[in-house]
Image (cartoon, helix red, strand yellow):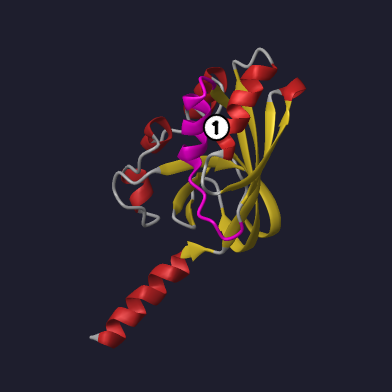
């Protein structure tokens, strides 16, 4: 029995990809002044897995450094920006990848998050790479409309695992982030 349990645990761990996000770039929408930028900056700095935030007021952008070995919660970034009264217009996450295989419409688990890759060629990520989050509320409404019309998969619209995700081992109704390189 113990041997079977060890085999199952090893199989689950092997399905998870080796990657660690180290930093991100977030562009906020709706900022009109330095006080707005400061509100977003403070909200982001309060997120537990963020080590530091630098703002670029001209571009309404924020360079984020994540704490080493911390689990990143992408929705927590969105919630922090929205709690400050603004929206995300673009979110890019940079990390170090070690043999992470991606392909168009493939679901990959990184850390505790499920990622569904869109509009990418089959490849293996090694070293530093940047992914762009394409989900609703992480891109502008116009961009999301274009992205969502390019895929017939239900999870793109909802951000929750659907039948399309089960082939890659994603549990029903699990949160799925749609991304591209």
Task: For residue 135, say whether it is visible.
Answer: no
What residue is drawn where x is 55% and y is 32%?
43
Residue 13 in percent (x, y) is at 43, 69
Task: For residue 98, say whether it is visible.
Answer: yes
* In the displayed structure image, the side of residue 93 where residue 76 appears, left or right: left
Provide the residue span drawn in magenta.
Answer: 68-86
Between 20 and 60, the one lying in front of the other is 60
What residue is drawn where x is 56% and y is 21%?
140
Is 64 one of the magenta-colored residues? no
Q: Which residue is mark 1?
A: 43
Residue 162 occupies quadrant: top left
Residue 130 in percent (x, y) is at 67, 46
* In the displayed structure image, the side of residue 180 where residue 135 appears, left or right: left
* In the displayed structure image, the side of residue 174 where residue 123 appears, left or right: right
Between 123 and 88, the one lying in front of the other is 88
Is 70 one of the magenta-colored residues? yes
Residue 64 in percent (x, y) is at 66, 41
Which structural element holds mark 1? helix
How many badges with numbers are in the image? 1
Above-or-below relation of 2 to 129? below
What residue is drawn where x is 76% and y is 21%?
58
Residue 86 in percent (x, y) is at 54, 20
Name the quarter where the C terminus is drawn. top right
């Amino acid at each position: 029995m113990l041997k079977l349990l060890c085999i199952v645990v090893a199989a689950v761990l092997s399905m998870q990809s080796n990657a660690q996000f180290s930093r991100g770039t977030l562009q906020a929408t709706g900022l009109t002044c330095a006080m707005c930028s400061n509100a977003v900056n403070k909200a982001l700095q309060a997120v537990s897995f963020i080590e530091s935030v630098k703002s670029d007021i001209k571009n309404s952008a924020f360079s984020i450094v994540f704490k080493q070995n911390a689990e990143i919660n992408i929705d927590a970034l969105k919630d922090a920006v929205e709690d400050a009264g603004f929206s995300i217009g673009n979110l890019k996450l940079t990390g170090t990848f070690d043999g992470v295989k991606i392909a168009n419409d493939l679901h990959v688990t990184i850390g505790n998050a499920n990622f569904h890759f869109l509009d990418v060629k089959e490849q293996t990520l090694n070293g530093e790479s940047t992914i762009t989050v394409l989900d609703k509320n992480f891109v502008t409404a116009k961009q999301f409309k274009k992205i969502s019309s390019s895929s017939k998969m239900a999870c793109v619209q909802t951000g929750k695992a659907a039948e399309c995700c089960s082939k890659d081992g994603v549990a029903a109704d699990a949160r799925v982030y749609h991304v591209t390189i």
